[in-house]
Amino acid sequence: MVRVKQILGAALVAGLATLGGAAFAQGGNVDAGAKVFKKCKGCHQVGKGAEHRIGPHLNGLFGRKAATYEEFNYSKGFQRIGGGGLVWHAESLDAFLENPRAMVSRTRMSFPGLEKAEDRANLIAYLRQFSDNPADIPEADPTAQGVDHDLDPAILALKGDPEYGQYLSGECTTCHQSAGGDDGIPSIVLWPEEDFVLAMHAYKSKHRIHPVMQMIAGRLGDEEIAALAAYFATLEE
Amino acid sequence: MTLNRRTFLGAAAAAASLSAPMVRAMGKPRVVVVGGGAGGATAARYIAKDSKGAIDVTLIEPTRKYYTCFFSNLYLGGFKDIEDIGHTYGGLAAGGVNVVHDWAVGVDRDAKTVSLAGGATLPYDKLILSPGIDFVDGAVEGWDLSAQNAMPHAYKAGSQSELLKAQLQAMPEGGVFAMVAPPNPFRCPPGPYERVSMVAHFLKQNNPTAKIIVADPKPKFSKMALFQEGWANHYEGMVDWIGDDFGGGNVSVDPNAMTVTIDGEETKVDVCNVIPAMKAGRIAELAGVTDGNWAPVNAADMSTKADGDVYVLGDASAQGDMPKSGFSANSQAKVCANAVRGALTGSKVFPAKFSNTCWSLIAPDDGVKVGATYEATADKIAKVDGFISQTGETADVRKTTYMESEGWYSGITADMLG
């Protein structure tokens, strides 16, 4: 068995080598992250009913542009960096949490940072649970964080039947546009087959939290997921 | 072997049956689809697209512009313009579907032809009916189609939606908006309640002392806990829902006096949205494939129990567990298209899989959803698995759900119409 998070971790390390961000690529531990979050609790809320306090609440953090809650009074430093296009992903959070002031020069967040890479990875994995955001696919940053399940290499090695995939795709294209547009539901065309298969199995095993996708993936067999991956990987319309 | 009468007839019959496919092979197989909504448009598009010209597909749809029923409540609430929910059929035509703007007025199942109001008669090998709904005569005492201007149903989107919105906008300060909700089964189970939410949103912005009364013949309804939570949170004191337990099913209306009488109590109202009991669109009945109000179908391919060459999709069908929704019709259409194409061209037929999700908007950025997957069993389309939004969800989750519904709208309209 190959640990999926190891595969993903390897992919992330490769993709982000220039950032030197191996730490967050290891995949954090959610429970350990909950303990780390105690340091943040004085100012930030997360989870059901979370509201802005001294700092903004942290639900839906992943994939969100920094400093975008209109009702929250951000520091000038944060407004500037948000305007500059900073989006919260695993790697940007990792960099920020290591030394907040180094990244956002005049943030009001009076926190020295988390020196240990493991703490940061754990905290990111914990926070990741509160971002139920469909913009989080394909199976790469940021959703890759916290994915912790096993996928048999034999499943990844399955060759899908694109004709069957074309038929099955009808169930996808009611929401996901076959032409690849994204108006609130992400594009799923032209993904690498392995990413597609990993993502669908993550929904099937409920490691990904979107209820529609858990339901749809939940009754697809390995062959069917492979067929869909094969079809969408080559779709041209 | 001597040639006797029996073997002679047998040989003749064999020759005749062999010649039949040859006759058809001289022209392409023909599919006629009646109704250009979520079921019919999808079926026409998929058969034309996937058969790559091997099947002649004709779509009969009277309107040149189709207004989706889904999201028409968002138009009432001010979240969409009417043109946002209007679509033309040019994409289908460009995709190889012969789009005929006419009414189908008759089906001759022996001759396998459909007759049109304009006088034409179209032959078919397979006929797909996706006519949506019509209203049951006399379902609401005092109301019939001649009263639909005074008391709009707005349950077929377009001019009726615009009329209801105009009436909503013209309501006097502190006026009363009444809704007569339909009995089960009906198109879009959360639809009346999303509409109540959207009307309440409009009134809260423009006429905050106005009231909404809902007379409902049902004791409960789709996403009830979610809607009631939302009404209490966003529109406190504005919505008075009168269910069957309190006489909500005992209703009559007077379109001239603009009164609604619920369980003997008469109320003067300013707007009255009457959503009567529903039945399959008339052409299904004319084709003789209905049993009661709906057309029973086989779950595996959506063919009717009455005729294996006639299929019924969407709201008009009696199929089992799926709600009558655009999503369901679209899902059923793809199963049907696969089966029809297989029957006519020998392409591979895969097992039926169905799914549905219904999103509803309660207030700005407060979206909820319910959905399920389904499979074909011997006697019906049966539910496999499902989910529903929870009460007390965070604002972020609700906003994401609403954004997702926007994505779905783009997705399904592209999937239907190309």
Image (spheres, coloured by chain):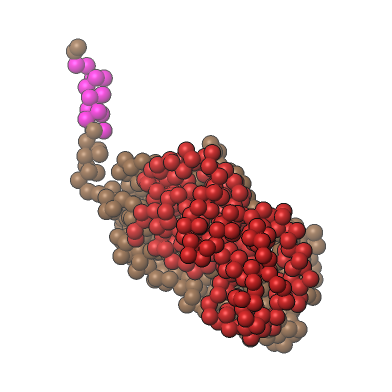
Chain colours: A red, B brown
Q: Is residue A116 visible?
A: yes
Q: Is residue A95 left or right of residue B117?
A: right
Residue B42 quadrant: bottom left
Residue B11 against residue B115 in the figure, above or below: above
Percent of width and height locating residue B116:
36, 61
Q: Is residue B340 left or right of residue A207?
A: left
Is residue B137 covered in magenta? no
For this orientation, the residue located farthest to the top is: B1
Q: Residue at x 50, y 46 (%)?
A: B353
Q: Which segment did they paint magenta?
A: B3-17
Percent of width and height locating residue A231:
39, 50
Percent of width and height locating residue B182:
65, 62
Q: Tally the marks.
A: 0
Percent of width and height locating residue B363:
66, 73
Choose between B390 and A234: the one closer to the eye.
Answer: A234
Residue B256 against residue B95 in the figure, above or below: below
Q: Residue at x 31, y 50 (%)?
A: B51
The kind of secondary structure the magenta stretch mainly shows is helix
Residue B235 quadrant: bottom right
For this orientation, the residue located farthest to the front is: A115
Q: Residue at x 53, y 53 (%)?
A: A9
